[in-house]
């Protein structure tokens, strides 16, 4: 089953929202947990229980697990496996980007069928060159998974690099166009990441043919009602808004977490129509 079919089925069943698992130390404290590997594991358990059976896509932010070293990675392995067992697609937010054989190793680490961190998709940075991502693309195609490529990110510093002109178009548009070309086969192996906060220097998303991850809802300031205008060029069926802290702040109660995600998802669905 292609990634496109898996993705379509997940959002048809559970709605257009990517829930981020970002165990910030401040959130652990707010939930009454210690900022250590044990606190991380308890935080993760709540998230898996709340979102695993309900969210279409779950995006663990790798940095917050990596902070606890091997113990943190053990928690992450378990989060990924259990969320997938519950039927969610797991997009590991590792933002990897390197060259040649190193990129091959990253591909195996995140998209290898038997890898401990094996995920449905992984975020990658194309800023060492889109073609440097080929090992990830090829493994994703072989294993019916996806890579989500940073195009126009939500942070204000992104403009100088991503909106620079190269051969008559912005660098970010070049990234989106590369994704569109690959997705011409209908498999949606390449998602693009375009911040929901970006009101300026927008990219034309009309030809993407794959998921458009739009982080920035909530704490970074974007609202569901901003989406139609900011993503006016996109096929809305591919739009996947994402939120982390604004949902996680409802914890630690599992029902409250689930309700917060459902409220955000319903607002997104209502805004996108
Ligand atoms: O790739 C991402 O997910 C990402 C891209 C981007 O442009 N902006 C962005 O905020 N993110 C991630 O999305 C999450 C946003 O978290 P909140 O701001 O708490 O909703 C973090 O894990 C970021 O690393």
Image (spheres, rainbow, N blue to C red):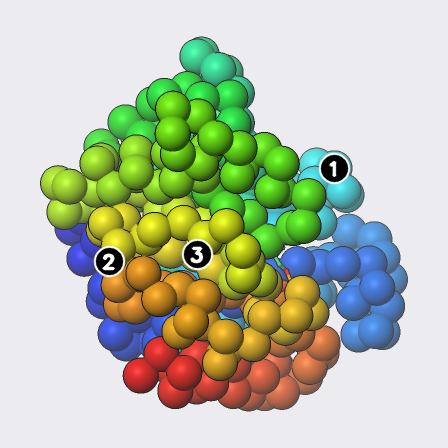
Q: Of tags 1 and 3, which is closer to the observer?
A: 3
Determine the residue located farthest toward the front in the rendered image. 168
Residue 159's tag is none
Residue 209: x and y in percent read 23, 51
Q: Ligand 1: which quarter?
A: bottom right
Q: Tell me if 148 is positioned left or right of 49 in this view.
A: left
Residue 31: x and y in percent read 80, 74
Residue that numbered label 1 is attached to: 69
Q: Please name whichever residue, 159 or 95, is drawn nearer the observer in this view of the structure.
A: 159
Q: Secondary structure at mark 3?
A: strand
Residue that numbered label 3 is attached to: 213
Cβ atoms at labels 1 and 3 below 8 Å apart: no
Q: Of tags 1 and 2, which is closer to the observer?
A: 2
Label 3 lies in ligand 1 vicinity (Cβ under 8 Å): yes
Q: Earlier in the sequence, mark 1 or mark 2?
A: 2
Q: Please name whichever residue, 233 or 99, is drawn nearer the observer in this view of the structure.
A: 233
Q: Tell me if 261 is positioned left or right of 238 in this view.
A: right
Q: Earlier in the sequence, mark 1 or mark 3?
A: 1
Residue 191: x and y in percent read 35, 47
How much space separates mark 2 and mark 3, taking CA atoms? 16 Å
Q: Residues within 10 Å of mark 3 (few under 14, many from 20)?
A: many
Q: Residue at x 51, y 21 (%)?
A: 128
Residue that numbered label 2 is attached to: 6
Image quadrant of residue 218? bottom right
């Amino acid at each position: 089953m292609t990634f496109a079919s898996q993705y379509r089925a997940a959002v048809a069943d559970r709605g257009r929202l990517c829930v981020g698992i970002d165990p910030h130390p401040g959130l652990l404290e707010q939930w009454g947990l210690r900022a250590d590997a044990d606190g991380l594991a308890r935080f993760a358990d709540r998230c898996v229980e709340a979102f695993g059976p309900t969210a279409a896509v779950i995006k663990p932010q790798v940095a917050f697990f990596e902070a606890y070293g091997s113990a943190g990675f053990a928690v992450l392995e378990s989060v990924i496996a259990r969320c997938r067992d519950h039927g969610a697609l797991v997009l590991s937010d590792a933002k990897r980007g390197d060259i040649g054989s190193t990129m091959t190793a990253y591909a195996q680490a995140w998209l290898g069928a038997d890898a401990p961190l094996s995920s449905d998709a992984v975020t990658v940075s194309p800023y060492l060159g889109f073609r440097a991502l080929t090992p990830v693309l090829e493994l994703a195609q072989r294993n019916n998974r996806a890579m989500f490529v940073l195009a126009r990110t939500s942070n204000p510093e992104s403009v100088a690099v991503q909106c620079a002109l190269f051969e008559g178009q912005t660098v970010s548009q070049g990234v989106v166009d590369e994704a569109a070309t690959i997705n011409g086969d209908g498999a949606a192996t390449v998602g693009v990441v375009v911040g929901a906060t970006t009101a300026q220097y927008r990219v034309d998303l009309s030809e993407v043919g794959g998921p458009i991850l739009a982080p920035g809802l909530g704490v970074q300031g974007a609202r569901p009602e901003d989406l139609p205008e900011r993503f006016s060029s996109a096929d809305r069926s591919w739009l996947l808004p994402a939120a982390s802290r604004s949902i996680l702040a409802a914890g630690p109660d599992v029902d409250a977490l689930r309700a917060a995600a459902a409220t955000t998802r319903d607002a997104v669905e209502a805004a996108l129509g």
